[in-house]
Amino acid sequence: MKIGIQTWGSDGDILPFLALAEGLQAAGHQVTVAYTSVDNKDYSVYSISGGFNSFRAFDTFTVGMNEAMDAIVETNDPMKQFMFVMEKFFNPAVEAMYQASHKLCAENDIVIGHMMNHTLLTAAEKTGCPRVVVALAPLAIRTKYIPLFGPNLGSFLNPLTWMLGDYAGRKKLFSLAEKIRRRAGLPPLESMQKQLYESKELTLIASSPTLTVRRQDWGDHIQICGDLNFRASDRHIPVPEGMEEFISSGAPPIYMTFGSLAPFRSEQTDQIMSDAVEKAGCRAVIQSVWSGRDSPHIFRCSQAPHAKVFPHCSAVVHHGGAGTTHSSLRAGRPSIVVEHAFDQIFWGSELQRIGAGGKVLHRNTLTADQLANAIKATLDSSEMKNKANQPGGIMQREDGVKTAVELIEKKFQAQN
């Protein structure tokens, strides 16, 4: 099959789709990926090594994510956070993204898209091209068994929260989607949750079954495939010089990273992390863009291959991104989650639910004492270590990309 893929966002939104593209290409399909990086990053090295085609749909954002994160982290309101992101990092690219969407739909047998990408939905409807949705977190997939927000009101009243969220989202987040749809001669969206976040053809939830509960009211078109990570993980990221020696020279260190959010308040963050390490009396690898002060207990790096390094650490301090959440759990290591925004509190809460993490901390109120206490509690908890280790072995045997490829082929190969 000829398959077009379109995604948008940061590393955590783009790398899973590149992993899926490589898997589909290896299975004999002809794959083209269009991506829009909010950091204006070039991911062509992945398509070159993976043997598929790729191009940037848009790469001229003028607002930096570091600058934007100040406004995002200051509010705990997810709707305001998403409104800001859409205004600064989606809407400026929407016309270029729609052109890319239309090209993919016109030139391929099926298309696969990020659940937030309304331009691909419009282009797929306009051209009649089958569309697969990939959800990198299950929290936007509608179910009557949990509310979209607030306390659980039961299966009779929970749907009201989803209806309210859908109405507010269409009005505040996707106004440009309606303009494009009108121009394409298509009717307005009746429901983001039923039309955009899901595809009746196939919706893949890219999360491990160890973390994601399948809801009884999900139809067969919704499948949990596992997280989409490269099997030869972190291939383009070498182990920093001196890291292996540091790790083997003493007690297993904790690993501290806020992923793509590392530039946000980097000097302050590094100071909090460094002070917390000293207060907790442990060793640490700190992934930071800030050089920080010298300490024999700390090894600093700008990046490292998590799949190779995490298994040699005692715990992972991270921001609760989907990728780092799965990487830490796959390594069998407990987490200390410091959420910044978006779905990060969800992943932190899921780790807490299965016992592989403690109470979720918040970047806006984080202190060195608070982080040190969380580190000590985690390292002292044999129960938390065991709870993290149990799903780790299961996840190491999972292959989300392979499962996703099989589900896509099962659904569409007979039609082509």
Image: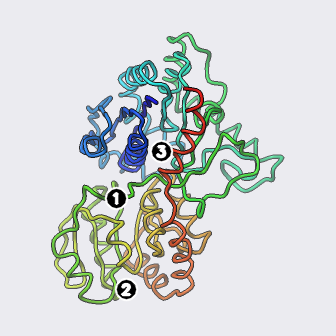
Disc 2 crowd rating (10 Å Cα; few below 14, some 14-19, many 20+) is some
- Residue at point 48% right, 23% down? 176
- The spot of residue 54 in percent (x, y) is 31, 34
Name the quadrant of the C terminus. Answer: top right
Task: Find disc 2 in the rendering and name its residue.
Answer: 280
Measured Cα–Cα span from mark 2 to mark 3 = 33 Å
Q: Please tell me in which quadrant of the rendered image residue 240 appears.
A: bottom left
Q: Is residue 187 above or below residue 307?
A: above
Secondary structure at badge 1 equals loop
Secondary structure at badge 2 equals helix
Measured Cα–Cα span from mark 3 to mark 1 = 34 Å
Identified by mark 1, the residue type is Ala
- The spot of residue 71 in percent (x, y) is 39, 47
- Residue at point 38% right, 75% down? 311
Identified by mark 2, the residue type is Ala
- Mark 1 or mark 2: which comes first in sequence? 1
Task: Find disc 3 in the rendering and name its residue.
Answer: 81
Task: Find disc 1 in the rendering and name its residue.
Answer: 232
Q: Are marks 3 and 1 in contact (CB under 8 Å)?
A: no
- Residue at point 21% right, 75% down? 243
- Mark 2 or mark 3: which comes first in sequence? 3
